[in-house]
Structure formats: structure tokens, C-alpha cells
Image (cartoon, rainbow, N blue to C red):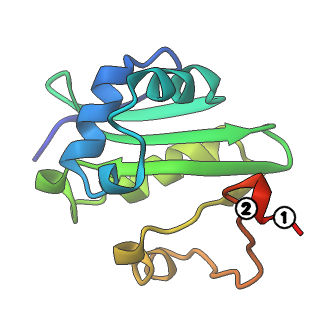
Amino acid sequence: MMDITYKIENQLDPKEFVEVLRRSTLAERRPVDDLERMKKMCENADLIVTARLDGKLIGIARSVTDFVYCTYLSDLAVDEKYQRKGIGKKLIEETKKLTPQAKLILLSAPAAVEYYPKIGMKKHNHCFILDDLKELK
């Protein structure tokens, strides 16, 4: 059995963040080659919950939240070597414990769309995204 430590690490090293994203499937959808942007993502997150095995970062849940109404879990990543062991679910659980009144919201990676309903999350069909201000009509 693995002895995984879960804790809040709001001062996470952005290089460590990038590495765990690369070892998961999330790096392809994040600006991992822009270290300054990744640094700002870490600094401006309200809540970062990590999973470590023998000190090595193997999972992360990075959220933006007001702690009482909504928690946007913007990055949920688990090293591919450690996936399917309940680590992602535990990171979600720890995040929700820290924001019990808030609705937890996330946008699924395409490969994980079928996973979230299996752990009890409800699918929402009314989400909208604006990437570029020029797209606003």
C-alpha cells in the first residue's frame, strides 16, 4: 500500500506543477512552456491540494474559490503511473472538505468525461467559454 500524503500547498513551486502536468495528460491543454504564466497560475490560485509519495508530487488539485459559493477546480492532475488508484477522487474530496458550502465546478479533460459521473459528480450542460475578447459579439 502506498503512503500518500495530501496537504494544502498554496506556495507550490511552478516547476513542480509543470512536471506533474507533464506526467499526467493535462500538459497538452495548459501553457506549460510559459513558466511565468505557470508561476502566476500557482500564485493566484486560492487553494492548491497536493498528493505526494515519498516527497514526490504525484497529484494536484488547483482551485479558484471564494470558499462559500463556488470552487472552480481548474486543474486536477495525477501522474499517469499513479492513475486509477483513487488519488484524483481523494484530491476532489480534500478540496470539497475545505470548501464545504461551495459548489465544486470543473471542466473535464476529454478523456475523463465518463469518470466524473462514476464518482458521483453531476454533468452540467450549460457551460460557456470565451477564450478571446474578439469573439464577443
Q: Is residue 5 visible?
A: no
Locate residue 114, reporting x and y percent: 42, 84
Q: Mark 1 is on which residue type? A: Leu
The reply to whether dot 2 and dot 1 touch (C-beta < 8 Å) is yes
Q: Residue at x 86, y 49 (%)?
A: 69
Left-right relation of 10 to 126: left
Locate residue 54, reporting x and y percent: 14, 25
Q: Residues within 10 Å of mark 1 (few under 14, many from 20)?
A: few
Choose the circle earlier in sequence order: 2 or 1: 2
* 9 and 100: which is toward the camera: 9
Locate residue 77, reporting x and y percent: 35, 50
Q: Mark 2 is on which residue type? A: Leu
Residue at the right extreme of this rendering:
137
When the figure is inspected, residue 10 is found, relative to residue 53, above or below; the finding is: above
Locate residue 94, reporting x and y percent: 52, 44
Q: Which residue is mark 2?
A: 130
Q: Quadrant of residue 103?
A: bottom right
Q: Residue at x 60, y 41 (%)?
A: 63
Q: Residues within 10 Å of mark 2 (few under 14, many from 20)?
A: few
Element marked by disc 2: loop
* 74 and 59: which is toward the camera: 74
Q: How many marks?
A: 2
How far is mark 2 from mark 1, CA to CA? 7 Å
Q: Which residue is mark 1?
A: 136
> Nearer the viewer's eye, disc 2 or disc 1?
1
